[in-house]
Image: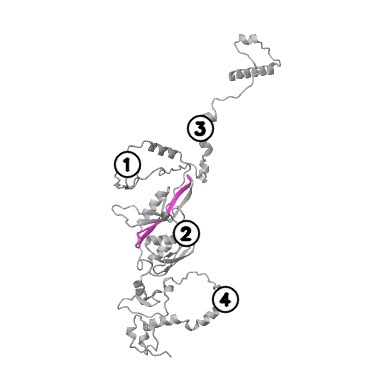
Amino acid sequence: MAALCRFSRMILLELRSAQGKHGVLPKISLNSGLAENRPITGVLGCITLQSRNTSFFNRLTASEIWKGVTSVSNAGKKRGRGKGTGKITPKNLNRGQVIGVGDKNMIWPGLNAPIVRGKEIVERQALPENVERKAKLIKMRDDMPKFRLFKVPPLERGWSGGRYPGRSIGTPDRVGEERFEGFDTKVLEFKIVTNMTGLFGRVKTQSAYVVTGNKNGLAGYALGKAPTGPSALRQAKNSAANKLMYIELFNGHTVYHNFYAKFGRTKIFVYKKPKGHGLVCHRAVKTICEVIGIKDLYAKVEGNSKNIQNLTRAFFHGLVNQKTHQKLAEETGLHVIELRRENDYFPTVVAKPPEGSKITPPDKQIDFIDYISEGRVALKRKKHDVFYTRLPSWQKHLNKTLYRRNHDKVKLQLRAELGAVKSYLSDLAPEQLPDIKGVSALKGKKIKPQQ
């Protein structure tokens, strides 16, 4: 039919050309057409149709057509489109598996069978091979619906669920024959960074910032970048193991003294705390302390607290530069005295200057916090008075307790000066003295009453 239409179209073109030349249509008879062996049938009633040997649909396969509809162009990929396409969703291969049941069908006492059955002890025994087990597992995996991510166990979770920051990624890889036994590595920051290039467009890279340590004062931190996440974590972990630094701890649980550190726009004030206080600080600082081995600490971060890298550098800078008690005594030429709350703030000498050094009295009294923190003080919010302090009943309470308002201070001063809570009437009744350390040495000593 298509050939006939093309032939009829040729005849019509010949007729129009002949009419244009002479102005009269030539006479074409059926006999003349047959004499020239040209088939003329239904010339005037033919419908012309356009035909092509090839088309868009028979030139490409179905998969290629579908890919062209659903995929993203190269220009779209440079602009960050189509992030979720092309991902292979894994399947939960643990589904259908039973402990103690495998390719070889056996009875394992304690796993898939009881240890004692009645009065007899169950022994290990081989059973006939289960042919249908593997087929059922394959069918179950093929019929699996949408994949759900595995839930991270509660003890292995990080700061926010199953994300990497705050999670442990194990010990660093060994270097030669040296192994990092007792080390633990934790992720502080894990993110995607991009770099715009003229040849490849926007290039994405995984960035990992980790800290590693042995929980006994030895720790290090590093940054790793790679095209994939696992390789970036491995690179950062091994790099941190090659940059270890030793940090001295006071009694193995806290820092030696309060200190101030700064890096960039991030400032951190660290305070020494007694045992049992715990870690009250930024979550990144808490993770670093767990890796180093610090158990009791209070830290306040000022400035930019979201920059984890600057915060880590500032904290490590302060830890490395802290001074021991003996070093402070050698620098100042003075005795270092510690006052603890659990000892009722009784002064205790913790370090002395070396023998033979000249102790020159300072021009003014040295404030320890001012000396250590370089004159910087952490910002404290103004505490508003409690509501009941404005009531008349609170004023009555203050009037009743006025006579003993300074008892604690007086006791502290007596213990510092005399070594015991004692007054000028103690020599008249020495048996009434409290049983406190240092009282026996002062029982026979008379104290003059203060004027």
| Circle nearer the viewer, 4 or 2 | 4
The numbered dot on residue 106 is 1
Q: Label 2 vs label 3: CA separation?
A: 50 Å
| Circle nearer the viewer, 1 or 4 | 1
Q: Position of residue 83 (x, y in %)?
A: 50, 45
Secondary structure under the numbered disc 4 in the rendered image: helix
Disc 4 residue type (three-letter):
Arg
Q: Position of residue 397 (x, y in %)?
A: 53, 79
Q: Label 1 vs label 4: CA separation?
A: 80 Å
**Nearer to me, 123 or 175:** 123
The residue depicted at 51 percent of the width and 29 percent of the height is 59
Judging by the rendered image, the residue that carries numbered circle 3 is 62
Disc 2 residue type (three-letter):
Asn
Q: Label 2 vs label 1: CA separation?
A: 57 Å
Q: Earlier in the sequence, mark 2 or mark 1?
A: 1
Judging by the rendered image, the residue that carries numbered circle 2 is 307
The numbered dot on residue 390 is 4
Q: Is residue 164 above or below residue 102?
A: below
Disc 1 residue type (three-letter):
Met
Q: Is residue 63 above or below residue 98?
A: above
